[in-house]
Amino acid sequence: MIDIRLLRADPESVIAALSKRGIDKAEIESIIELDNKQKELNMQADQARAKIKQLSGEVAKLKREGRDDEAQVLQSQSRELGEAASAIIVQAERAASAAKEALLVTPNIPAPDCPVGKDEKDNVLVRSWAPDDFNAWQDFQRVPHWQIGSELNILDLESGAKLSGSMFPLFRGAGAKLIRALTSFALEAHSDAFEEIRPPTFVRSETMRSTGHLPKFSDEAYHMERDDLWAIPTAEVPLTSIARDQILKESELPIRMTAVTACFRREAGAAGRDTRGLLRVHEFDKVEILSYATLDQASSIHMELLDRAERLVQALGLTYRILDLCTGDLGASSRRTFDIEVYSPGCDQWLEVSSVSWFGDYQARRANIRYRKASDGSIEFVNTLNGSALAWPRIWAAIVESGRQKDGSVLLPKCLSPYLGGKLKITSEGLS
């Protein structure tokens, strides 16, 4: 969440920054009002407690002097003040709780260099890339991946729907091996600097709150009410909370982690969007890269995560572009995000396959992740950053469509050869 001290010290700058995200001034002013109410009530409670302490001393003095009747009068006043103070404290706690709840659904302050805009139409193209041997898309590549998958028996959407419902894909044979090869390829690419983690797939509510997925996105997550556990929408959720409520050493930073997990999303807001094939699914595998860093380290780490995701897409030989997301299209917790989109010739769409985000200390405040500065021993919140490197359904789709040959087979990227036993061609008979 945003720093309440910043809101107190410079409310106008916070209001101006969040207005770029479409947040109404009145929403922020209501938080300020609740915060001021809490402070005023706490002051009243402190004054009442001070008066009670004073009366207590006077009562003791009167009793020593044998003036019990006068002491009883003051004791009665003290009890009344105590009851009033208790009621004030309850009101203060309610105001504080309301302010916190409001802050939990208030998005992060966008970075100063984040493009200003209303929605995805205002995102800024950073760069694009196509393979050196790219000329033009052939007609045989203009076939959607769900048709190719069915023809080669590597994607079985019907069986997935029979088992779990729509938008739960089932990969078969070479299609399943392709997912496994992509995962091994990505994990090995990050193994030089990132600790590999295999976190739990189900997490507590507090873990989801730490990244900002609760309470704002509860409708898009799968919740097991009996155990109060949530199926993770991304490995970002458990990885961020590994150091929850801890104080790290500055010398430990930056900390880099990577994980592959299944990810679960209801996609509650997907009505009307294209949900065919693998374009939008409820369950998918994704390799995540995440870092804790100091504020001074954050910019370079952000570029490092983006570079890693970009190099993977490039190695896979996919045509892609990088977008700098505008303020109106940022995720709620992000200060700045770069998206990588690959071109899908069969669907004739640009498909997002990676979001690389810098969250500042927004998530760290929620998770209480801090570090001790080496220079003076003071305690600061870490900055968190993460990226998809990569999410596989749309990568799978783009590879299958881009690699389709005139005879209907699919030629896979050479970088996957070590993970497929040197076999890079998918035919109706399998890998060869």
Image: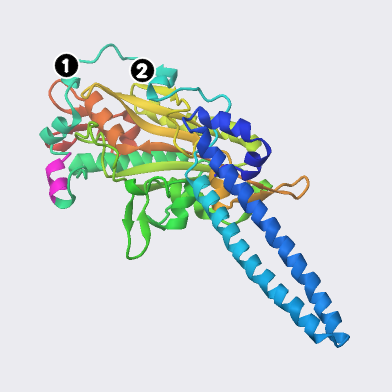
Q: Residue at x 80, y 79 (%)?
A: 59
| Nearest to the observer: residue 347 or residue 210 | 210
Instruction: Name the residue at 61% across, 50% down.
Output: 37
Which quadrant of the view contains residue 389? top left
Residue 12 forms part of the magenta stretch: no
Residue at left offset 69%, top offset 58%: 44
The kind of secondary structure the magenta stretch mainly shows is helix
Residue 230 in the image: state x and y as whole percent. 36, 55
Q: Which residues are magenta?
A: 155-162
Give the residue pinned by disc 1: 139
Q: What is the crowding at mark 2: few (fewer than 14 residues within 10 Å), some, or many (at least 20)?
A: some
Is residue 41 shown left or right of residue 139?
A: right
The residue under the point 32% across, 44% down is 285
* Residue 387 screen position, x and y as percent: 45, 37
Looking at the image, residue 341 lies above or below residue 60: above
**First along the sequence among labels 2 and 1:** 2
Nearer to the camera, 70 or 221:
70
Considering the numbered disc 2 on the image, is that residue within a helix, a strand or a loop?
A: loop
Instruction: Using a 10 Å C-alpha cutoff, classify the residue at mark 1 as few (fewer than 14 neighbours), some (14 to 19) or many (20 or more).
Output: few
The CA distance from mark 2 to mark 1 is: 18 Å
Q: Which residue is mark 2?
A: 130
* Residue 284 seen in the figure: yes
| Residue 287 drawn at (x, y percent) | 39, 42
- Amino acid tagged 2: Ala
Instruction: Judge whether residue 264 can be spotted in this image.
Output: no
- Viewer-side residue, 23 vs 125: 23
